[in-house]
């Protein structure tokens, strides 16, 4: 019986997170039957937020485009549930894979769990302990309806233990099911892709020339989180901080559409050294990041990318899920920043670059245990 995997992606970081799984599945599919399907929910739809990543990385065309588009959190999540459910009823996958903490993650996981299809959550166990973030609500709920919880770090596993999940060892020889879950520390799928992609970026990207910037002579800024952009007072505070710490340093700011809309509505302006540009593709972004003298960001993924590339990061939030980046000294929360970074250790958190292989082998093993149990029961 082939394993039938169905992946749900829809927002920019999820295209990057899915890519290593596509590659790992391709590898194992040479020896064993796997049916692999992909749903693009359509949460992100602009070329520069979506298709550019498929084109650059060679991600295969998704099997389904659900075109849920923008909307309030309730509407967007509800549309994902409704449209994913229809696909799941037709496709009947053994496992539904969801990634990270977006509305597409939660909507997809809910649709699957309600049809009693096991959910595998990639990037399970992360917590900011701040329920005002839509991402925190999405990830807590997704974890609690998932059967397979693939964690990027020890901290993530410990967070799940605190919430009553058992450890990987206790379940090693048991079949995961809706009440009996598998928690596994596999590392981070973004680490799988980053090192090779940053070499590709060197060859493919011309962005430093296009922007006429010199390595290590500028800072990079990204800002899009609802908790920052949607509260005018908070946004004003962040803009004042950015203006203050980057004074005289050129800043490159690829602006996310959420921020563009809000900024166009009128705001305390960024200073003249802050250069606003369109969102960048993956290779250009990596090239701009690895050559930046610092990163200022509220993105989760970019805190890790900066850490792996050894670029000091200032996180424009009150807390971070990626606590190891702060403990190592490469990342500092903006309220704690006192004009310099003092990294104490080489980046070594978040796995060995083989997270996707571990995920796929773990799912295949569980599937063969389920098959064996079915044969025994007959
Ligand atoms: C979503 C995720 C966030 C993730 C981010 C990555 C949720 C709750 N949040 O936030 O965790 O870090 O993606 O980018 O799921 N828009 C466009 N074009 C697009 C996509 C969005 O113009 O291609 C506009 C929408 O109209 C909307 C705004 O951007 O006004 C926000 O989009 P949305 O997908 O709801 O959330 P993000 O802020 O991107």
Image (cartoon, rainbow, N blue to C red):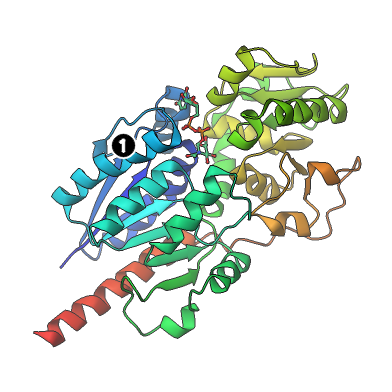
- Residue 303's place in the image compared with 168, above or below, is above
Q: Position of residue 114 (x, y in %)?
A: 27, 57
Extreme left residue here? 378
User: Is any atom of residue 122 visible in this view?
Assistant: no
**Relative to residue 310, is residue 12 drawn left or right?**
left
Note whether ligand 1 is within 8 Å of mark 1.
no
Given residues 218 and 101, the one toward you in this image is 101
- Residue 129's place in the image compared with 373, above or below, is above
Q: Residue at x 31, y 79 (%)?
A: 175
Given residues 239 and 313, the one toward you in this image is 239
Given residues 126 and 75, the one toward you in this image is 75
- What number of labels is visible? 1
Give the quadrant of the C terminus: bottom left
**Relative to residue 19, is residue 375 drawn left or right?**
left
**Relative to residue 60, is residue 313 drawn left or right?**
right
Q: Residue at x 52, y 29 (%)?
A: 281
Q: Position of residue 240 (x, y in %)?
A: 81, 26
Q: Residue at x 61, y 13 (%)?
A: 265
Q: Position of residue 285 (x, y in %)?
A: 60, 32
- Residue 129's place in the image compared with 368, above or below, is above
Circle 1 sits on which residue?
79
Given residues 153 and 119, the one toward you in this image is 119
Q: Residue at x 72, y 34 (%)?
A: 291
Give the quadrant of the N terminus: bottom left
Mark 1 residue element: helix
Residue neighbourhood size for the residue with mark 1, other residues' Cα within 10 Å, grouped as few (<14), some (14–19), many (≥20): many
Quarter residue 2 falls in: bottom left
User: Is any atom of residue 166 visible in this view?
Assistant: yes
Q: Position of residue 315 (x, y in %)?
A: 73, 42
**Relative to residue 109, is residue 200 drawn left or right?**
right
């Amino acid at each position: 019986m082939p394993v039938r995997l169905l992946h749900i992606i829809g927002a920019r970081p999820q295209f990057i997170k899915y890519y290593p799984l596509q590659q790992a599945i391709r590898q194992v599919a040479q020896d064993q039957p796997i049916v692999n399907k992909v749903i693009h929910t359509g949460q992100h739809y602009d070329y520069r937020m979506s298709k550019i990543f498929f084109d650059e990385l060679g991600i295969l065309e998704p099997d389904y485009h659900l075109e849920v588009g923008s909307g309030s959190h309730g509407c967007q999540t509800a549309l994902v549930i409704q449209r994913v459910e229809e696909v799941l009823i037709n496709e009947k996958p053994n496992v539904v894979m969801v990634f990270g903490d977006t509305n597409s993650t939660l909507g997809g996981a809910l649709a699957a769990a309600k049809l009693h299809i096991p959910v595998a959550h990639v990037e399970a166990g992360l917590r900011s302990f701040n329920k005002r973030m839509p991402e925190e609500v999405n990830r807590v709920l997704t974890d609690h309806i998932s059967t397979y919880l693939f964690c990027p770090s020890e901290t993530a596993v410990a967070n799940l233990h605190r919430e009553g999940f058992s450890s990987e060892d206790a379940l090693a020889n048991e079949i995961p099911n809706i009440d009996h879950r598998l928690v596994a520390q596999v590392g981070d799928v973004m680490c799988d892709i980053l090192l090779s992609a940053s070499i590709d970026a060197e060859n493919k990207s011309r962005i430093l020339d296009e922007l006429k910037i010199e390595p290590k002579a500028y800072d990079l800024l990204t800002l899009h989180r609802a908790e920052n952009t949607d509260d005018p007072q908070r946004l004003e505070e962040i803009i004042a901080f950015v203006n203050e710490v980057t004074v005289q340093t050129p800043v490159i700011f690829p602006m996310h559409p959420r921020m563009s809309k809000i900024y166009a509505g009128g705001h305390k302006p960024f200073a003249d050294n802050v250069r606003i540009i369109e969102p960048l593709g993956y290779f250009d972004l990596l090239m701009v990041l690895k050559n930046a003298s610092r990163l200022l960001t509220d993105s989760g993924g970019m805190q890790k990318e900066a850490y792996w590339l050894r670029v000091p990061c200032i996180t424009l939030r009150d807390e971070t899920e990626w606590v190891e980046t702060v403990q190592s000294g490469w990342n500092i929360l903006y309220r704690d920043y006192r004009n310099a970074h003092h990294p104490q250790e080489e980046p070594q958190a978040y796995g060995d670059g083989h997270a996707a292989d571990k995920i796929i082998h773990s799912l295949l093993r569980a599937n063969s245990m389920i098959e064996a149990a079915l044969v025994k029961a007959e």
